[in-house]
Image: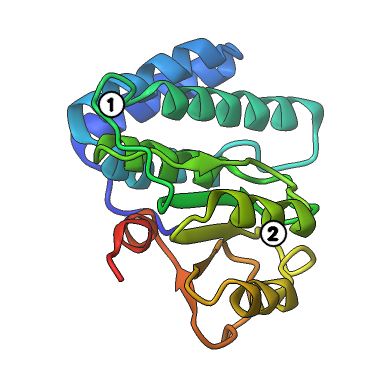
Amino acid sequence: MQAEHTSVAAWHTVARIRSAVDDHDADRIATLIVERIAADGVVPTWQRICLPLLAGTGAGDSGPAIAAEHTLSEGIRAGLDRSCRTRGRVLMPSGALLAAVEREQHSLALHAIAAGLRERGYDCLLLGAALPWTALTDAVRRWQPRTVIVWAQTTVTARTAPLVRLGRDFPALRRCAAGPGWPHPLPPQVVAVGSLAGALRAALANG
């Protein structure tokens, strides 16, 4: 999900988060993310702060680089999960289901989508990383969401055949493919999601 221009206020937060990463202080990162979301909202915080930091932190295979990347990811995840919890939410059986595909360990963007939905007064069913396709199918059958958003980081985990089967088994289900792993073009009626704002529009669309 593409980053956008970073404001002056966001740059200050970025600098403070980088300092917290150096200290391996995920709790401080989470607090800064919560504060920025309260000030600017989920989408600007994700686009202007989280994505640039994720792109620039932990580049390398060394122990310190990997530790820094994990500290940052955990802090951002915790901050997203803490945010927008005090507003009224509408948990609808016809809402959105979010999951990373089978064998896919990356799911941070799904936490951003969930936070964005809460900010708008809605909740969702977030099933996290590496959800087997059989479990996803069962969740769709049981919960009957209007929309399912599935994340794939790499071409290794992105399989379109199960998406096609979901459409065959649940014709009314809106299927959205998020993440850089998916091939293009996607199967018919599968919506490509390329940004957090786009994911929120898809999850909240009527019809």
Residue under circle 2?
A: 137
Residue under circle 1?
A: 36
In the foreground, 24 or 182: 182
SS at mark 1 in the image: helix
Judge whether 38 appears above or below 147 on screen.
Answer: above
Q: In percent of the image, x 27 and y 35: which residue is there?
A: 119
Tag 2 near tag 1, CB within 8 Å: no
In this picture, residue 90 sits left or right of residue 8? right
Cα distance in 3D space between marks 2 and 1:
36 Å
Look at the image and tell me in which quarter the N terminus lies.
bottom left
**Is disc 2 surrounded by few (<14), some (14 to 19) or many (20+) residues within 10 Å?**
some
Disc 1 residue type (three-letter): Arg
In the foreground, 57 or 170: 170
In the foreground, 38 or 4: 38
Judge whether 159 appears above or below 57 on screen.
Answer: below
Judge whether 199 appears above or below 129 on screen.
Answer: below
| Position in image of residue 44 (x %, y %) | 27, 43
Instruction: Kindly tell me whether residue 177 is visible in this rendering.
Output: yes
Disc 2 or disc 1, which is closer to the eye?
2
How many badges with numbers are in the image? Answer: 2
SS at mark 2 in the image: helix
Question: Along the polypeptide, which appears first: circle 2 or circle 1?
Answer: 1
Disc 2 residue type (three-letter): Thr
Instruction: Kindly tell me whether residue 45 is visible in this rendering.
Output: no
| Position in image of residue 197 (x %, y %) | 31, 56
Q: Quadrant of residue 207?
A: bottom left
Q: Quadrant of residue 34?
A: top left
